[in-house]
Image: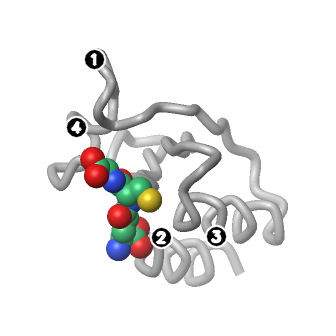
Amino acid sequence: MKLLGTDTSPYVRKVRLVLLEKNLPHRYLVDPPREPGSQVVRANPLGRIPALILEDENCVFDSPVIAEYIDGVFT
Ligand SMILES: N[C@@H](CCC(=O)N[C@@H](CS)C(=O)NCC(=O)O)C(=O)O
């Protein structure tokens, strides 16, 4: 899994904590959505972070949804 975000976003920090709590292997990529070449707009149609890209390239976005997803799938 790959998490797109920035260190300054509280929503990203929340998701990072959930990933750490679950001890899930993932890559964290600092990727400000408004910077040219950002992957965020391709991953999330809303253009917002956090965006969690799964192994099958599907993307989960919106921090409460990501937290629920992680909690539900990785028990
Ligand atoms: N409800 C969303 C809010 C996410 C959000 O607002 N993220 C901000 C950063 S803190 C963002 O991506 N802003 C991008 C922009 O405004 O271009 C969540 O909980 O994930």
Where's the N terminus, which quadrant? Answer: top right
Name the front one of labels 3 and 2.
Answer: 3
CB of residue at label 2: within 8 Å of ligand 1?
Answer: yes
Q: Position of residue 45 (x, y in %)?
A: 15, 50
Answer left or right for 51 relative to 11: left
Name the front one of labels 1 and 4.
Answer: 1
The reply to whether discs 2 and 1 touch (Cβ–Cβ < 8 Å) is no
Q: From mark 2 to mark 4, how far is it between C-alphas?
A: 17 Å
Quadrant containing ligand 1 reads bottom left
Quarter of the view holding residue 18 = bottom right
Where's the C terminus, which quadrant? Answer: bottom right
Disc assigned to residue 66: 2
Residue at x 29% of width, y 33% of height = 34
| Viewer-side residue, 32 vs 59 | 32
Mark 2 / mark 1, whichever is N-terminal: 1
Q: From mark 3 to mark 2, how far is it between C-alphas?
A: 10 Å
Q: From mark 1 to mark 4, how far is it between C-alphas?
A: 10 Å
Mark 1 / mark 4, whichever is N-terminal: 1
The reply to whether discs 2 and 4 touch (Cβ–Cβ < 8 Å) is no
CB of residue at label 3: within 8 Å of ligand 1?
Answer: yes
Residue at x 66% of width, y 36% of height = 27
Depicted 34 relative to depicted 10: above or below = above
Q: Which residue is mark 1?
A: 36
| Viewer-side residue, 30 vs 71 | 30
Residue at x 33% of width, y 28% of height = 39
Q: Which residue is mark 4?
A: 41
Q: Which residue is mark 3?
A: 14
Q: What residue type is disc 3 on?
A: Lys
